[in-house]
Image: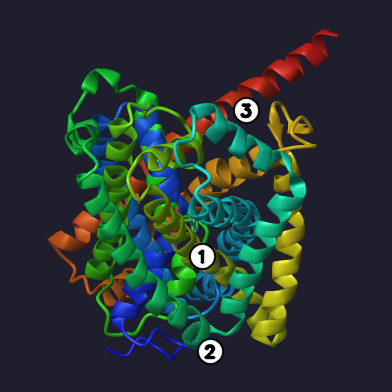
Amino acid sequence: MALGSDSRHGMWSSRWLFVLAAAGSAVGLGNIWKFPYITGENGGGAFVLIYLVCVALVGIPIMMSEVMIGRQGRSSPIHTMRKLADKAKRSRKWTFIGWMGVLAGFIILSYYAVIAGWALKYIWITGSGSFQQATPELATSTFNDFLADPWQLIFFQTVFMAATIWIVGKGVSKGLETAIRWFMPLLFILLIVLLGYSINSGGFAQGWAFMFDLKFDQVTPETWLIALGQAFFTLSLGMGTMMAYGAYVPDNANIGSTVVTIALLDTVVAVSAGLAIFPIVFANGLEAGQGPGLMFVTLPLAFGQLPLGAVFGTVFFVLVSFAAITSAISLTEPALAYLVEEYNAKRKRVAISLGVMCWALGLGTVLSFNIWSEFYVVGDLNIFGFLDYLSQNVMLPLGGLLIAVFAVWALPAAVREKQLGLRPGVVSIFWKIVGGIVAPLGVLAVFVYTLLPVFQRLVEMGASMLAS
Ligand code: TRP
């Protein structure tokens, strides 16, 4: 099957490397930090089930659309969208998807690097035994003191950003693939080690029950929306990451089965992270619904009470750091590929310039945890809050919605059938219904819901202005 030429940035050396690279992008802070804490906040089992439904009905079809568009265009998302829109005789306005993706990746990476820096710091302090027999007060103040010190945050943010730039600057096969070949197997091994540890911690039955006992009385409409948003972020959808990675996928790889494998790996890691974390938390009589502090306060505290806790705690934060860096490199790819194509520039040089700008924007996030914590951009959102809200609640859902609509309704059927290997018939119709109707409607629901308070506020502001 000849689909076209290779990408100028290089190609994944096999279908498996694409699976690992995309899983590397997908598995990150979203799985290990966020998934357990929002599961904790939303009552456990029923949330996990709803999240799985969202991955299956919205995540998988949208990821198929992204990868398919990417492989068809074989360029950066911006140029791919322009090319495919021209070819399908559609408006060039579709290129907006590419532009918004570049911007979203830039914004997400700017704060992602700051939070990943916390994990780097925690490798250090957990390993030095700071949490041995620590009290809850000590664990809390360790975290708060760290956040209060901008220089420390900047130091670890810089280390993380530099590592990311160094890897991406080396290119697709020498940089991305090498990092992925090393980090992904290590990540799986570390996760299995931690699971073994947590099974023996004494709290496993309780942790298991928390994750899998269905308590439907706790489900609200909001649960669905949180689960859908999480499915989106964790699968790296909506900003062209999967489109950029899709551009390097060999012609003979089957997109459907590949995407299902990626989504399964991502889900297995998220669920395993929960199963590694909650038993340790329960074994120490701590609370599951701690929020974002679960990983940086509760967990170190729990490790500190357990035999060999300093060792396994360190292992845990090494795991988080690897997971974060393989995600961070994917956030840069849409912008990097675009700049290289547009200006015929050297990849390394582009990587450094982009990295420095992104690092600079990240300073806003650093300061949001200390001296500028009450500097509000809009409403009660400080710089970090605003960037996080804008990227995750506005840009990603909007991008995902447009991508799904473009893939199913704007691209010629022939492209779709060739890329997905779908013969006209039942499967093709099924994909069209799920990918083109169910998934976009699901996203639309989140989108409208998250933006509703914003509209309400605007209306109120308008009304009060009129009244005065
Ligand atoms: N999926 C990653 C995580 O779970 C984060 C990430 C990487 C991402 N690339 C992305 C999120 C693109 C949205 C879009 O941590």
Residue 454 is labelled as 3
Q: Nearer the viewer, mark 1 or mark 3?
A: 1
Most distant residue in the left direction: 426
Q: Nearer the viewer, residue 358 or 53?
A: 358
Residue beneath label 1, please? 325
Residue at coordinates 20% horizontally, 45% vertically from top-left? 200
Q: Badge 3, how many Cα within 10 Å: few under 14, some, many 20+?
A: few
Corner quadrant of residue 108: bottom right
- Crowd tier of the residue under label 2, counting other residues whose Cα lies within 10 Å: few below 14, some 14–19, many 20 or above: some
**Horizontal placement of 69 versus 97: left or right?**
left
- Whether 46 is drawn above or below 327: the answer is above
Instruction: Tell me which corner region of the image, top left, top right, bottom left or bottom right, holds residue 221.
Output: top left
Q: Amino acid at mark 2?
A: Arg
User: Residue beneath label 2, please?
Assistant: 8
> Where residue 9 sits: x, y (%)?
53, 86
Is 189 in front, or is 337?
189
What residue type is disc 3 on? Answer: Val
**Residue 88 is at least partly visible in this image:** no
In the image, farthest residue toward the top: 467
Is residue 425 something that shows in the picture?
yes
Dots 1, 3 in contact, CB < 8 A: no
Q: Is 386 above or below relative to 163?
A: above
Q: Amino acid at mark 1?
A: Ile
